[in-house]
């Protein structure tokens, strides 16, 4: 059986590109979704038609019971999950002073607690097998902070801390943990940005364009494939953060 990966948030822009990139390389793919079940099921069918082993799971990553059930089913379908990509994420835009406690908590529940719950499910079998790889999808805003995205920036910075700590904790067990910090990528997450905001971000980017989900997927694969890289945060941002 080929090696398997579980990708959270795989109904979205970057998640779909990740699923296609892993499937093209012959990986068995667990496609997790939350609200975008229709898109995730269509993607699963598309990959199966191309001969991939692909399975779809629906869960709220902030819910311990749902994450547990998803991993149990994924192990049954795909066997050992050698790679986990924590890609599910949400943003909240606005002034910190306008943010309610429940809005703040929701961002952390999905972006940080979700990654914690998935890592905790994935790790015991990786430790038993003495191999495995986790990639957390952070953001350049977690590296330098974005105005009007305080909770998002803080949650994405937390993912970098989680990555570094886990890389130290699990390195002796042969498990690598890395992070990818995308810049402005052309996905539905940026749909709420005005054309003016998008143009300003493009102008601030040395390569003068937004990135594609495929470029993020390529970076994730390169981290998975390199056996001596762990604890690192790889920027995929056209030079926005240097
Ligand atoms: P997207 O909105 O297209 O996808 C986000 C995914 O997360 C969706 O599949 C959604 O269903 C899932 N999700 C949301 N809430 C969830 C929950 N409670 N439980 C489970 N899944 C949930 O956005 P995208 O641009 O593809 O983002 C993917 C990741 O990349 C996110 O973590 C995002 O923060 C990060 N990122 C995106 C950009 C960008 O410019 N698009 C930049 C930096 C980082």
Image: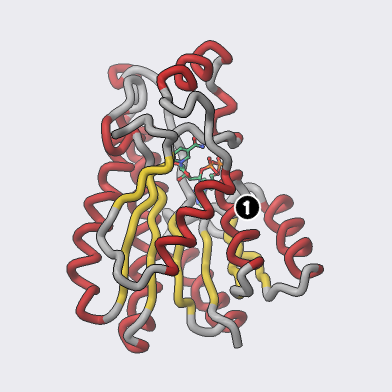
Identify the secondary structure beneath mark 1. helix
Query: From the viewer's perspective, is 141 left or right of 203?
Result: left
Question: From the viewer's perspective, is residue 210 above or below residue 82?
Answer: above
Q: Residue at x 44, y 69 (%)?
A: 225
The residue carrying mark 1 is 16
Viewer-proximal residue among 121 and 231? 231
- Expressed as whole percent of the image width and height from the top left, the position of residue 66 reads 49, 64
Query: From the viewer's perspective, is 99 left or right of 192?
Result: left
Q: Residue at x 24, y 66 (%)?
A: 167
- Expressed as whole percent of the image width and height from the top left, the position of residue 152 reads 36, 35
**Which quarter of the figure is the N terminus placed in?**
bottom right
Q: Residue furthest front?
A: 207
Q: Residue at x 49, y 21 (%)?
A: 202
Q: Badge 1: how crowded within 10 Å, few (<14), some, or many (20+)?
A: many
Q: Residue at x 28, y 56 (%)?
A: 232
Q: Residue furthest right?
A: 49
Callout 1: CB less than 8 Å from ligand 1: yes
Viewer-proximal residue among 75 and 99? 75
């Amino acid at each position: 059986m080929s090696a398997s990966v579980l990708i959270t948030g795989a109904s979205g822009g970057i998640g779909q590109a990740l699923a296609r990139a892993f499937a093209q390389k012959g990986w068995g793919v667990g496609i997790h979704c939350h609200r975008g079940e229709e898109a995730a099921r269509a993607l699963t069918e598309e990959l199966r038609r191309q001969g991939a082993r692909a399975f779809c799971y629906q869960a709220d990553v902030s819910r311990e019971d749902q994450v547990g059930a998803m991993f149990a089913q994924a192990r049954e379908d795909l066997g050992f999950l050698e790679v986990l990509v924590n890609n599910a994420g949400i943003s909240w835009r606005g002034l910190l002073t306008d943010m309610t406690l429940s809005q703040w908590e929701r961002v952390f529940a999905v972006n940080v607690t979700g990654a914690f719950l998935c890592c905790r499910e994935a790790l015991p079998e990786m430790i038993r097998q003495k191999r495995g790889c986790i990639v957390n999808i952070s953001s350049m805003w977690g590296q330098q902070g974005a105005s009007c995205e305080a909770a998002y920036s803080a949650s994405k910075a937390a993912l970098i801390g989680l990555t570094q700590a886990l890389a130290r904790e699990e390195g002796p067990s042969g498990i690598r943990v890395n992070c990818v910090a995308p810049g402005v990528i052309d996905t539905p997450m940026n749909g709420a940005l005005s054309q003016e905001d998008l143009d300003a971000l493009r102008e601030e980017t040395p390569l003068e364009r937004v990135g594609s989900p495929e470029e993020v997927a390529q970076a994730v694969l390169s981290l998975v494939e390199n056996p001596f890289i762990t604890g690192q945060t790889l920027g995929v941002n056209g030079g926005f953060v240097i």
